[in-house]
Amino acid sequence: MSAPTAPPREELEPQLEGFRSELTGYSYRMLGSSFEAEDAVQETMIRAWKALDKFDGRSSLRSWLYRIATNVCIDALNGRKRRAVPMDFGGPSEPRMENLREPLPDDQWLEPVPDVRIAPSGADPAETAVARESVRLAFVAALQHLPPRQRVVLILREVLCWKAAEVAELLGSTVASVNSALQRARATLDERGIGAADEAGVNPPAEDHVELLAKYVAAFESYDMEALVALLHEDAEQNMPPLELWLKGSENILAWMQGPGAGCKGSRMLATSANGSPAFGQYRLHPDGVHRPWGLQVLRIEGDRIAGISTFLDTKLFALFGLPEKLEPAA
């Protein structure tokens, strides 16, 4: 039986770009950073383009690209600390200004990812659902606690539904080794109260909560914190990377927003979506009457209430999410 013959280069080159979105999602789950994921995919594409003449067709082009992306991501993770969320650093804080510490460097924090980068409009609805469900902030944060190869195995087996033999071939390993790595990865996630299947579907898409989100925006923009807190679960959480401080409980969130966080009064909000969740670009009012980027809020919704608010105080994210650099005063 003759070996498979790879299509000519001129047929393969146009196909590479078609894998960018799913490779971005894969790299983001591996690295926990939108910016690093973009860089990893670009490096993957460059390596693939240079080596395209060596592609022999024995595996699918998709599998071949994932092998390259995996090597790029593992190289990026070598010798690097995992990306964290504020809850990794200890228990909740009291809502007082004196509990604020110097921000940690941006490269130590988990970053949000725009939904459009991992599941562009026009994608198959089933693929879009998988992409949304498997990039929830809590799930991606839990992935960062896994060693790189366990991370690869869990993502490929549990999220992308690869067969154990396919993962073993990609890693140059054995099925037994892959199954063992998957068991250890699952155990780690179980210890953190997260499962690949459990986290999926916890946070329905924004279109399922139009009224709730409209009330949230109205309350925040009018700075009616009593109305905003009425939309929260009693044990809701709020965190603000790169600050270690995080709050638990609607009363503590209210105390913070009416106290140290009162500088957010007068903010405007623009809707977007991140990590399969409703999100908003928050623009704070400056003395010149212009609203400028302050933070990207990602909401976690459970039932008919908001259970979590993660505000990423990194204004570089606004350009990544296609949000404007400022909002002029209303005419």
Image (cartoon, rainbow, N blue to C red):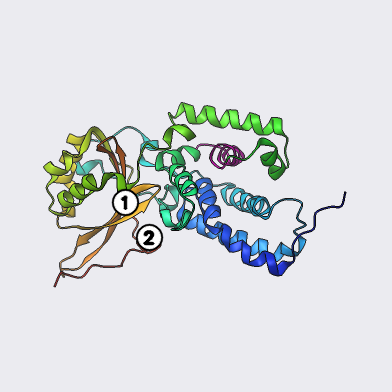
What's the residue type where badge 1 is placed? Answer: Ala
Place of residue 313 in the rendered image (x, y in percent of width and height, measured from the top left): 32, 53
Q: Is residue 39 left or right of residue 261?
A: right
Which residues fall within the magenta stretch? Answer: 145-160
Residue 97 as seen in the image, left or right of residue 172: left
* Rendered residue at 61%/53% (across/down): 69
Q: What residue lies at 72% left-to-right and 62% top-to-bottom?
A: 51
Q: Is residue 42 above or below residue 302?
A: below
For residue 321, which numbered disc appears in the image?
Answer: 2
* 237 with respect to 2 (left or right): left
Q: Secondary structure at mark 2?
A: loop
- Spot occupied by residue 211 in the image (x, y as percentages of width and height): 21, 46
Please tell me in which quadrant of the rendered image residue 11 appears.
Answer: bottom right
Residue 163, visible in the rendered structure? yes
Which comes sooner in the sequence, label 2 or label 1? 1
In this view of the protein, which residue sits in the foreground, 31 or 86? Answer: 31
Seen as rendered, the residue at the extreme right is: 1
Name the residue that disc number 1 marks.
279
Q: Which residue is nearer to you in this view: 98 or 145? A: 145
Please tell me whether residue 152 belongs to the stretch shown in magenta. yes
Q: Give the main secondary structure, helix, strand or loop, of the magenta stretch.
A: helix
Question: Residue at the location (13% across, 51% down)?
Answer: 223
Instruction: Tell me the distance, in whole angstroms, between the alpha carbons under discs 2 and 1.
Output: 10 Å
Image x and y of residue 205, in percent: 35, 46
At x 59%, y 28%, the residue is 183
Residue 28 forms part of the magenta stretch: no
The reply to whether discs 2 and 1 touch (Cβ–Cβ < 8 Å) is yes
Q: Is residue 305 above or below residue 111?
A: above
Q: Amino acid at mark 2?
A: Phe
Between 91 and 192, the one nearer to me in the picture? 192
In the rendered view of the protein, which quadrant contains the C terminus?
bottom left
Q: Is residue 215 positioned above or below 281 on the image?
A: above
